[in-house]
Image (cartoon, rainbow, N blue to C red):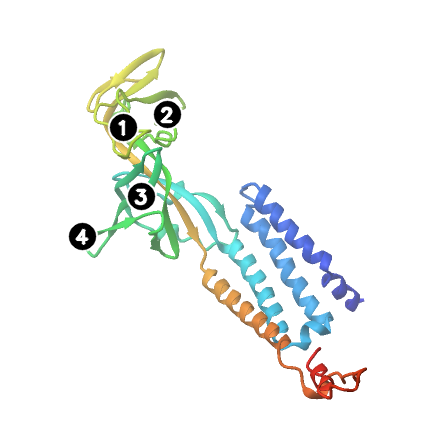
């Protein structure tokens, strides 16, 4: 019975099913709190590892060659590492306001159920950033400046880009195409408590035509509509330009049936308190990756390639003279060397 079960697990159908399920999850899987895509795709990878080990157990041919055996063991190890990576990894994104520190509670994405959460120990403050565009709105390199805490009160700056990650605690932060404007406002309630925060507007210039958002008044459930009024656009669709904050933008607030426009430093009364528009800042979007098993996976791939090359090289070894095919006699009997030449042909 156990042998029959192992034979079923070693079936090629199981191999194809595991690969098909992994592809389907990667293409059509959806994020979820209970079963994120990473955890779901770990199941077929784990099953593929079992399938390969079962095949090695039941198939003598796979064990006859050291190169072929090593290749399949490397594949099984790679499948196991891929499953573990999905269970412990993190692939997320976050938006960080200029002049504000990174907040791990704002991170969204695919987080493995066994991920060793260490984002709470990540500390950096977002500075400004530079992005150049070629004609036709083609984004070039992004250079985002962040400030890391140093010894004592001093801090050190670091440039982060699309291919220049900020690496802290095994996490890699890369800049993304997501960035935009963030009006900084302060709401002071009737008790005199002040609440200061930034309102992130949609990504710019991707959403240049709708630079607005809903904002909930602190301590209440009342939502007001705000948007950034840009008399002059800061992008150039036909020419080269650099991302910058507009100089003459104002904040439009629609609340309680009234439309009011604020310049930096101006205040309006709003739902039992006062709203002050402080200044216009920017925000930068980052992608976050945590995959500590990637170096081991790369090493396993190298081993698999070397083992496969070893196996293939063995197929091209010279054939022993003892195994040569005896040549047939010549029909004419005039060429004595013809029989010898036939021995070279396999």
Q: Please tell me whether mark 3 sits on a helix, a strand or a loop.
A: strand
Label 4: which residue? Answer: 154
The Cα–Cα distance between marks 2 and 3, rounded to whole angstroms, is 29 Å
**What is the distance, in whole Å, between disc 3 and disc 4 at their CAs?**
26 Å
The residue furthest top is 257
| CA gap, disc 2 and disc 1 | 24 Å
Return the disc, 2 or 3, that comes first in the chain's sequence: 3
Q: Earlier in the sequence, mark 3 or mark 4?
A: 3
Q: Are marks 2 and 3 in contact (CB under 8 Å)?
A: no
Residue at x-position 57% and y-position 71%: 309
User: For the residues carrying marks 3 and 4, which lies nearer the camera in this image?
Assistant: 3
Secondary element at tag 4: loop
Q: How many C-alpha atoms fall within 10 Å of the one at disc 3: few (<14), some, or many (≥20)?
A: many
Residue 15 x/y as whole percent: 68, 58
Considering only order in the chain, which callout, 2 or 4, is on the residue closer to the N terminus?
Answer: 4
Q: Label 2, on which residue?
A: 215
Residue 247, percent from left and from top = 21, 26
User: Which of 325 and 205 lies nearest the eye of the viewer?
Assistant: 325
Give the alpha-carbon distance from disc 4 to disc 2, as whole Å.
35 Å
Is 45 located above or below residue 339 in the figure? above
Q: Secondary structure at mark 2?
A: strand
Q: Is residue 336 left or right of residue 171?
A: right
Q: Position of residue 255 (x, y in %)?
A: 35, 16
Residue appearing at x 27%, y 47% in the figure? 146
Disc 3 target residue: 142
Closer to the eye: label 2 or 3: 3
Residue plotted at (52% across, 65% down): 301
Residue 256 visible here: yes
Q: Residues within 10 Å of mark 1 (few under 14, many from 20)?
A: some
């Amino acid at each position: 019975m156990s042998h029959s079960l192992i034979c079923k697990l070693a079936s090629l159908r199981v191999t194809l099913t595991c690969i098909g399920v992994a592809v389907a999850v990667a293409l059509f899987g959806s994020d979820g709190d209970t079963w994120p895509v990473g955890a779901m795709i770990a199941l077929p990878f784990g099953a593929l590892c079992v399938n390969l080990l079962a095949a090695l157990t039941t198939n003598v041919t796979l064990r006859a060659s050291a190169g072929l055996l090593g290749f399949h063991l490397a594949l099984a190890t790679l499948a196991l590492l891929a499953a573990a990576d999905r269970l412990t990894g993190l692939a997320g994104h976050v938006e960080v306001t200029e002049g504000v520190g990174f907040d791990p509670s704002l991170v969204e994405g695919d987080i493995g159920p066994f991920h060793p959460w260490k984002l709470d120990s990540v500390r950096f403050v977002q500075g400004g950033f530079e992005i150049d565009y070629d004609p036709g709105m083609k984004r070039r390199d992004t250079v985002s400046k962040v400030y890391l805490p140093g010894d004592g009160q001093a801090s050190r700056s670091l440039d982060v880009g699309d291919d220049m990650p900020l690496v802290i605690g095994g996490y890699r932060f890369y800049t993304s195409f997501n960035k935009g404007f963030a009006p900084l406002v302060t709401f002071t309630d009737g008790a005199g408590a002040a609440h200061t925060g930034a309102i992130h507007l949609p990504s710019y210039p991707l959403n240049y035509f709708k630079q607005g958002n809903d904002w909930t008044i602190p301590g209440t459930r009342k939502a007001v509509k705000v948007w950034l009024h840009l008399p002059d656009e800061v992008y150039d669709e036909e020419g080269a330009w650099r991302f910058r904050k507009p100089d003459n933008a104002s904040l439009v607030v629609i609340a309680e049936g009234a439309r009011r426009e604020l310049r930096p430093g101006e205040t309006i009364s709003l739902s039992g308190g006062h709203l002050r528009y402080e200044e216009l800042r920017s925000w930068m979007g980052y992608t976050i990756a945590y995959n500590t098993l990637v170096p081991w996976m790369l090493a396993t791939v190298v081993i698999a390639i070397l083992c496969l090359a070893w196996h293939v090289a063995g197929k091209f070894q010279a054939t022993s003279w003892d195994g040569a095919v005896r040549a047939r006699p010549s029909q004419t009997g005039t060429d004595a060397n013809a029989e010898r030449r036939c021995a070279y042909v396999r």
